Amino acid sequence: MSVNAWMYVLDDASLQEGQMAPVYPLGVNIVLARVSGAVYAVSGACVHMACPVFMGRLEGYTITCPCHDWRFDVRTGKFIDAPELGLKAYPTKSEEGKLYVNLG
Ligand code: FES
């Protein structure tokens, strides 16, 4: 299977507004987040010291890492205090009640 394929990761109804969920398509560590109805996907290991991002807080479009409070924009993955750093962002889509992530 091509890694360019859209990968099924979760049923759409399983991700509630304002929630995050870890998923591991092809073993890739990704966190999903739903904000204002849209679903975003960013890498699940913090760029600082690899803490699990999904265990942090989601407030609006901002994810705060649970370990040292680095904050990221869930739409882009960018570290808010230094946008040259950040989490990798992945495209998402919903089809027939299922969420997909494109690993690119
Ligand atoms: S590991 Fe995320 S802020 Fe340090």
Image (cartoon, rainbow, N blue to C red):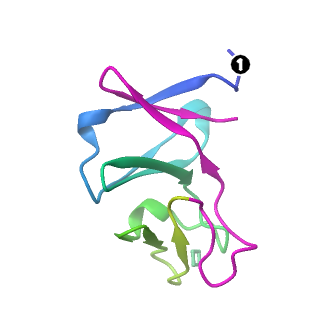
Q: Was residue 79 drawn as part of the magenta stretch in this picture?
A: yes
Q: Secondary structure at mark 1?
A: loop
Q: Was residue 98 drawn as part of the magenta stretch in this picture?
A: yes
Q: Mark 1: few, some, or many residues within 10 Å (few <14, many ≥20)?
A: few
**Which picture quadrant has residue 76?**
bottom right
Q: In percent of the image, x 45 and y 75: which residue is there?
A: 66
Q: Give the side of residue 68 with respect to residue 3, left or right.
A: left
What is the three-letter code of the residue carrying label 1? Ser
Q: In percent of the image, x 30 and y 25: which residue is there?
A: 97
Picture quarter with ligand 1 = bottom right
Q: Position of residue 83 (x, y in %)?
A: 69, 75
Q: Position of residue 84 (x, y in %)?
A: 76, 73
* Quarter in which the C terminus is drawn: top right
Q: Main secondary structure of the magenta part?
A: loop
Q: Which residue is mark 1?
A: 2
Q: Position of residue 19 (x, y in %)?
A: 30, 56
Q: Give the side of residue 84 with respect to residue 16, left or right.
A: right
* Image: 100 above or below 58: above
* Quarter in which the N terminus is drawn: top right
* Image: 92 above or below 19: above
Q: In percent of the image, x 57 and y 41: which residue is there?
A: 91
- Most extreme residue toward the right is 84
**Bounds of the magenta segment:** 76-104
